[in-house]
Image: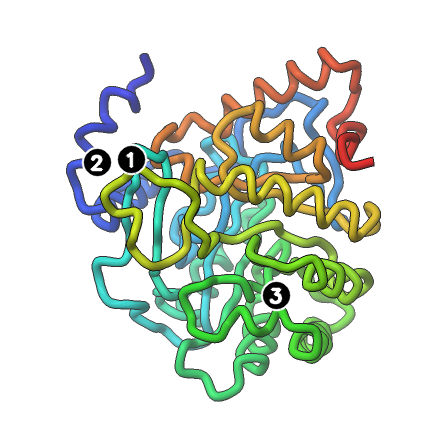
């Protein structure tokens, strides 16, 4: 039994946001620096970046870029901070974060609560200069912005200097109207604007999409993304509600964790087929084990990210996934993870 298994009942007595703040405080004390060495079979290059392993920490955990080095020390191959907006904002009223323990899930309606890009830039500059690993920055628009596309362009221009890559997050369900930027005309305008803001020397741009998409949306996003972004992150939380057992299942917001796994897996297959492997894909949603990660990779993901599973599986999750992935790859005759990407989508 792991120490986290013993501590989890204690941590889960706290309000979820308070427990999260305690976790961040603990990571500030964690020895910072390079992540533990990963098995060479897991290393690969994606979007021109070298990832020692495919397991990333998804945006939402370290919203303000406070502990990226501590997170890398847990064994993650990359860490994505944010979502960061141009101006600070409080987000939606509390309570806004809910554990669905019986379903091993989370519902959140946080609403991009963060301290703003200016303060985060100062912190991330120190991490970036340390060159400790792959640290991505997820940017969004302020809720009250009169020009959300301009917000994204500003975020790209401001944060590019301290980011290994930048993620354009247009898929949160908790900022009213934000997902409309996934529509073809709006997405075209957005991608033109962020590429102009990024310039020729900026970091790779990733686009994070929702799982709640129709086939025509998937085809349009895939077509518009090729040549305009370096990778697609599939996917954010869902507004759908599969059968859930927890008392808080009716709370509004984005659902993540185990109930999202099947939908996110299907979206990975959909985007792999729509893109034909012409753009790297990053799998997110319901991944809680090496088996889940391997299935997502075989469906088309070059990298994966986790967050909600940490609530139930603890801080050793990245290491366990990486160990299991290396074993499964060798068992199936692969000599490098990249050989397994998309084999089930052909």
Of circles 3 and 1, the one toward us is 1
Q: CA distance from mark 3 to mark 1?
A: 38 Å
Residue located 52% across and 43% down the image: 285
Q: Where's the N terminus, which quadrant?
A: top left
Residue where numbered disc 1 is placed: 101
Residue where numbered disc 2 is placed: 12
Q: Taking 283 as reference, is 59 left or right?
A: left
Residue located 43% across and 44% down the image: 242
Mark positioned earlier in the residue sequence (1 or 2): 2
Position of residue 43 relative to residue 134, above or below, is: above
Regarding residue 132, the answer to whether it shows in the image is no
Q: Where's the C terminus, which quadrant?
A: top right
Q: CA distance from mark 3 to mark 2?
A: 37 Å
Q: CA distance from mark 1 to mark 2?
A: 9 Å
Mark positioned earlier in the residue sequence (3 or 1): 1
- The image position of residue 174, as x and y in percent, is 40, 65
Query: Which image quadrant for residue 143?
Result: bottom left
Residue located 66% across and 44% down the image: 268
Asked if disc 1 and disc 2 are in contact, CB closer than 8 Å, the reply is: yes
- The image position of residue 273, as x and y in percent, is 79, 46
Position of residue 142 relative to residue 294, above or below, is: below
Query: In the drawing, what numbered circle is on residue 160?
Result: 3
Front residue (pair 272, 278): 272
Front residue (pair 138, 244): 244
Position of residue 245 relative to residue 267, above or below, is: above
């Amino acid at each position: 039994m792991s120490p986290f298994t013993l501590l989890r009942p204690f941590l889960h007595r706290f309000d979820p946001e308070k427990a999260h703040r305690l976790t961040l405080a603990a990571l500030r004390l964690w020895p910072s620096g390079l992540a533990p060495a990963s098995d060479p079979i897991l290393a690969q290059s994606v979007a021109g970046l070298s990832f020692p392993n495919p397991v990333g920490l998804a945006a939402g955990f370290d919203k303000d870029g406070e502990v990226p080095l501590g997170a890398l020390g847990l064994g993650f191959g990359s860490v994505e901070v944010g979502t960061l907006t141009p101006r600070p904002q409080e987000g939606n009223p509390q309570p806004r974060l809910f554990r669905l323990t019986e379903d091993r899930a989370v519902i959140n309606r946080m609403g991009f609560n963060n301290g703003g890009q200016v303060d985060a830039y100062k912190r991330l500059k120190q991490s970036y200069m340390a060159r400790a690993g792959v640290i991505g920055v997820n940017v969004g628009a302020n809720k009250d912005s009169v020009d959300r596309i301009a917000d994204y362009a500003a975020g790209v221009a401001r944060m590019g200097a301290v980011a290994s890559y930048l993620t354009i997050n247009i898929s949160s369900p908790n900022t009213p109207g934000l997902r409309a930027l996934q529509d073809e005309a709006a997405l075209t305008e957005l991608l033109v604007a962020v590429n102009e803001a990024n310039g020729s020397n900026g970091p790779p741009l990733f686009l994070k999409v929702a799982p709640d998409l129709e086939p025509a949306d998937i085809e349009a996003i895939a077509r518009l993304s090729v040549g305009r972004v370096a990778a697609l992150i599939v996917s954010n939380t869902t507004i759908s509600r599969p059968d859930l057992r927890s008392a808080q299942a009716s709370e509004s917001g984005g659902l993540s964790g185990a109930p999202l796994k099947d939908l996110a897996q299907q979206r990975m297959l959909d985007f792999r087929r729509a893109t034909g492997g012409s753009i790297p894909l990053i799998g997110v949603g319901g991944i809680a084990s090496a088996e889940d990660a391997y299935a997502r990779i075989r469906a088309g993901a070059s990298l994966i990210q986790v967050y909600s599973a940490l609530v139930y599986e603890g801080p050793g999750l990245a290491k366990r996934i990486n160990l299991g992935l290396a074993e499964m790859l060798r068992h199936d005759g692969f000599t490098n993870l990249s050989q397994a990407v998309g084999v089930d989508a052909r």
